[in-house]
Image (cartoon, rainbow, N blue to C red):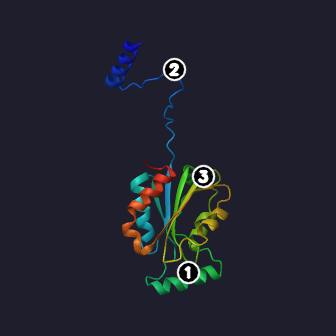
Amino acid sequence: MKIILVLSVICMVIFGMPIHSGEGSQAEPSGNTPKILIAFFSQTNNTKTIAEYIHSFVGGDMFHVTTKKPYPADYNGTLQVARAERDNNERPELATTISPEDMEKYDVIFLGHPVWFGTIPMAMFTFLEQYDLSGKTVVPFCTHGRGGPGRSVSDIASLCPNATILQGFAVAGSSVNQAQNDVAVWLRQLGYIR
């Protein structure tokens, strides 16, 4: 019996072969790596920075949601436009899109946005209403001023009723440049990195 065990260990070391005991079974890798999309809207590049951190850890494809009509460059101007869009329940036209066929290829969608008036920007409503994300996993992340994610996760869930919504990540815009380790901890908790 000892000779068999020694030979098994030698085979494992030399040939990289796993040792199988008669008790239980060893899981074989499935080879089904989920296809990941990191879709984000970012006015000041804070959310884009978090998207880049995520990409550095999990890979996947990145998609920057942009509007045909740009928002004003100054903060107060952006707030005025964003407030008017929210008050009028507008859906700004997007300059960038993904075809429904291409969206179908993704299993996991990391969805990033700044928090505007307690929720996702109206451009993200436009984006999400274009797709049926049934059966997909949606992982929200956001940047905010000081109010946290607000109702953004519940609004995303209502726009993606048949998707699995995972625990999101929220960070103050002023802390984005120091948030890479926090992003790693969050992704590890979700099981996307070891």
Residue at the outermost front position: 2
- What x and y, as percent, mark residue 99? 56, 57
Residues marked 1 and 2 touching at CB (< 8 Å):
no
Report the residue at 35% width, 20% height from top: 11
Q: Secondary structure at mark 1?
A: helix
Disc on res. 119:
none
- What x and y, as percent, mark residue 63? 47, 61
Looking at the image, is mark 3 or mark 2 earlier in the sequence?
2
Judging by the rendered image, the residue that carries numbered circle 3 is 136
- What x and y, as percent, mark residue 62? 45, 58
Judging by the rendered image, the residue that carries numbered circle 2 is 22
Judging by the rendered image, the residue that carries numbered circle 1 is 82
Looking at the rendered structure, the kind of residue marked 2 is Gly
Looking at the rendered structure, the kind of residue marked 3 is Lys
Q: Is residue 167 above or below residue 105?
A: below
22 sits to left or right of 151: left
Residue 93 seen anywhere in this rendered image of the structure: no
Looking at the image, is mark 1 or mark 2 earlier in the sequence?
2
Which is more toward the observer, 146 or 28? 146
Looking at the image, is mark 3 or mark 1 earlier in the sequence?
1
Report the residue at 65% width, 81% height from top: 88
Which is more toward the observer, 160 or 21? 21
> What is the crowding at mark 2: few (fewer than 14 residues within 10 Å), some, or many (at least 20)?
few
